[in-house]
Amino acid sequence: MAETLTSDYKKLLEKEKELAVLQSAESIVNWDMETMMPPKAINLRSQQLSLLSVINHKMSIDSEKGKLLDKIMRHLKYDELPGVQKRNVYLMKKHYDEQTKLPEQLVAEIAKQEALTTDIWKKAKATKNFSMFKPQLEKLVELKKKSAEILMKVKETRTPYDALIDIYEPKMTTTEITRVFTELKHGLGSLLRKCVTSSEQPNMKILRRKVPIETQRKFARALAEFVGYDVTSKEAGGRIDETEHPFTTGYYDDVRITTHYFEHFFTSSLFSVLHEAGHALYEQNLKHEWMYQPVGNSVSMGFHESQSRMVENIIGRSRVFWTYFLPKLKLIAGNDFSDLELESFVHAINQVEPSKIRVEADEVTYCLHIMIRFNLERDLFEDKITVKELPELWNQSYEEYLGVKIQNDSEGMMQDTHWASGLYGYFPSYALGNIYSGQLLEAMQKKLPNWQTQLTKGDFKNIKNWLVQNVHSQGNLYDAPELIKKISGKELNVEPYLNYLNEKYSKFYSF
């Protein structure tokens, strides 16, 4: 009997491995579409991605997989399986049940429409033409609504939008997100007022200098090397490429990041590289023995964002980091950076100012950008608003939350790729990641009280090891609410993140 259980479990993992390999190939095809693909190839690429999605779907709903899951879960000794194996079965069963409810034709249509909508988004954004984007976006939203309605029933969520959130942040709901966002908004509003009304404002002119793209590429490689993201050696498992919207994709031994270089805004690429490297480190430091297993994936996109935010902001925007790294930056840049001084530079890269663009937002205002998107997504999938209304409602929200006026839709609701790519329910993870990062920092400081001193000496090793041990190596063994409590001793809590922000920015803005 036990031999049969073991044999069936091994067969199930073999099928899961095939699926993981296919999905990793699919991610590289998507990467190529954003980085290397010639413009003329988009129609062919949309068909390729559609076919890959259909194959993925067929493998996911393989009836043999269903039979194996049923046999394993009915086995008399199922409850005696080790925790990792039971978690794998649970995750495979969840995915199988969800995918079997989605019609193959709908899966294919969504994949094809995502590719077409992303392509038209790039053109519409470049020409500031929402009317060009609107018809394709409407088609995609309708397809995603059909998918969400189906998934809501199998996931047993309260709303279709909750079903979409569950894809990226399992066990999280609109109600819980609304609660923590309300608390966070109150705390951020008070902090924002103190920062913008302070007389201690940074000199931003020191950052507005022309820096050649090739020099910025050298910056990027140096930052990657510092955090341990290998893109240069013969054993490298990473790459840094250029795209319109920075992202990370890949699996274990092949994890690629992208950035965007601006000649007159060099700090944009500095922090996008650190951000994406944080994502890459998570993927590359998952337990190798769990590769191809569901438990060997990341726990949630919120936790993924916690890692990118820790590397980008908590580490990368700290004074202690630049105490060590600014001299290296100057060495690469030569005379162009000879006038940069540590204190003025660190204050400038931590400027707090309401802005229009999410990816360039400071730590204090960033989550407000996410709250706007969350509100609009929620209302869109509850049929309270339409795609046509998005630009106007976006503009109104930005004036209300951040006090800024949007001049055109390219700096407004077309600034992100997520809606064109069909990633509805993803945005809340960014703010949840910030909240998680605050709790992780609080926990890390108890174990590594000297982490800042180590960083001034260029030692990132102990910080990285702590993250690997407590987050990366845990994979998907626990759902996010359980994992954050296991690490920090607390449930999801905005207080540590707000404490971190207040302590940090009170020093810059003297309050």
Image: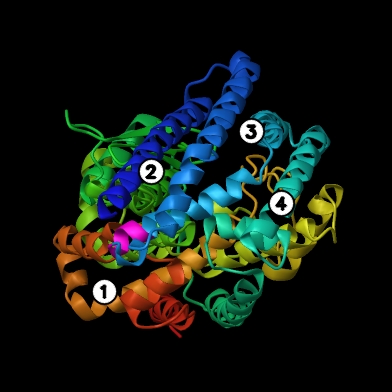
468, above or below 240, in the image: below
**Residue matched to label 1:** 444
Please give the residue where the numbered disc 4 appears in the rendered image. 150
Q: Residue at x 48, y 52 (%)?
A: 70
Residue placed under numbered mark 2 in the picture: 12
Q: Nearer the viewer, residue 295 or 216?
A: 295
Where residue 360 appears, as percent x and y from the top left, is 53, 53
Q: Are marks 4 and 1 in contact (CB under 8 Å)?
A: no
> Badges 1 and 2: C-beta atoms under 8 Å apart?
no
Q: Is residue 83 magenta?
A: yes
- Position of 411 compared to 293: left or right? right
Which callout, 3 or 2, points to the residue nearer the camera?
2
Type of amino acid at the residue the image marks with label 3:
Ala
Q: Nearer the viewer, mark 4 or mark 3?
A: 4
Classed neighbour count for the residue bearing mark 1: other residues with Cα under 10 Å, few (<14), some (14–19), many (≥20): some
Type of the residue with mark 4: Ile
| Three-letter code, disc 2 | Leu
Is 188 magenta? The answer is no
Of mark 4 and mark 3, the one earlier in the sequence is 3
Circle nearer the N terminus (2, 4): 2
Q: Residue at x 23, y 54 (%)?
A: 325
Query: Mark 4 and mark 1: span between their CA atoms?
Result: 41 Å
Q: Which mark is residue 111?
A: 3
Viewer-proximal residue among 305 and 394: 305
Q: Residue at x 59, y 30 (%)?
A: 54
Magenta range: 82-86
Question: Residue 501 in the image: x percent, y percent?
Answer: 44, 76
* For residue 495, side relative to residue 45 (left or right): left
Q: Give the foreground label among 1 and 2.
A: 2
